[in-house]
Amino acid sequence: MKKKQLVILSGAGISVESGINTFRDTDGLWEGHDIYEVASPIGFQKNPELVLDFYNQRRKQLLEVSPNKGHKNLVKLEETFDVHIITQNVDDLHERAGSSNVIHLHGELRKARSTIDKNLVYNWDKDIILGDLCEKQSQLRPHIVWFGEDVPLLEKALKITMKADILIIIGTSMQVYPAASLIEYVDPSTPIYFIDPNPAITGNTFDNLTIIKDIASSGTDQLVKVLTR
């Protein structure tokens, strides 16, 4: 029998328990930097060394942490469902936990790409420094979707979301576009589960919504029990 398609939209909240900071602090800064200084093409043009160092530090941090129970619980669901994860996170903790189908809307921290050819992408675990060039002799940059740039995998994510038999939202406020728009593409009858300690959406917004008001690790414990019982 064909497995039901389970689509999971994940955000920073699922990786917090592994020790990875969320994107913005309460004052709108990221690690003390204005977001646009370190996450925009203009910021990279103005001060490429600052931007490269910022992501070098994030990459080092990523290599020191491990997937948490929230990531691992999603792998269990593959026994019962055809699971597709669409994440806003640039870490690879879903993959390291064992998830098979992961789309990174905002890029991947452990990759670098050419500044003149977006199709030239390299696996990259060391620092990116000025002078690291692609095969076309252009400077490498983090393989991250910055503010003001297109989200190249959005169309693929839309097609997957439209086929969802069940939609799960974990660790994201669903306030950041275009990722937040994905929920609008599921059939109105599709069951939606929202795991978040402070959910931003309510049952008044969606008819078939179940809110699990909890952090990712214990919230996904509940989710696995509900979906596999």
Image (cartoon, rainbow, N blue to C red):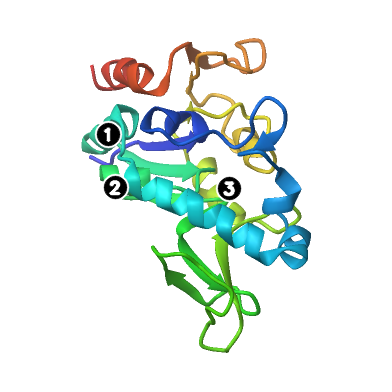
Please determine whether, in this image, residue 31 is positioned above or below residue 123. above
Label 2 SS:
helix
Residue at image mark 2: 96
Q: Which residue is mark 1?
A: 72
- On the image, numbered disc 3 is attached to which residue? 158
Direction bottom: furthest residue:
136
Where is residue 207 shown, x and y percent of the image? 59, 15
What residue is rendered at 63% in x and 17% in y?
201
Asked whether disc 2 touches disc 1, contact meaning CB atoms under 8 Å apart, the reply is no
Compute the Cα span from label 2 to label 1. 9 Å
In which quadrant will I find the C terminus?
top left
Type of the residue with mark 3: Leu
Q: CA distance from mark 2 to mark 3?
A: 24 Å
| Image location of residue 57, percent across then percent down | 49, 51
Is any atom of residue 153 visible in this view? no
Give left or right: position of 34 versus 94.
right
Residue at figure coordinates x 64%, y 75% from the top left = 115
Determine which of the numbered discs, if any, sits on residue 2 in the image. none
Amino acid residing under circle 2: Arg
- Secondary structure beneath dot 3 equals helix
The picture places residue 104, in percent across and down from the top left corner, at 49, 51
Left or right, 45 with reference to 113: right
Secondary structure of residue under mark 1: helix
Where is residue 204 shown, x and y percent of the image?
A: 66, 10
Q: Nearer the viewer, residue 139 or 119?
A: 139
Quote the CA–CA distance across marks 3 and 1.
Answer: 25 Å
| Whether residue 213 is visible | yes
Q: Nearer the viewer, mark 2 or mark 3?
A: 2
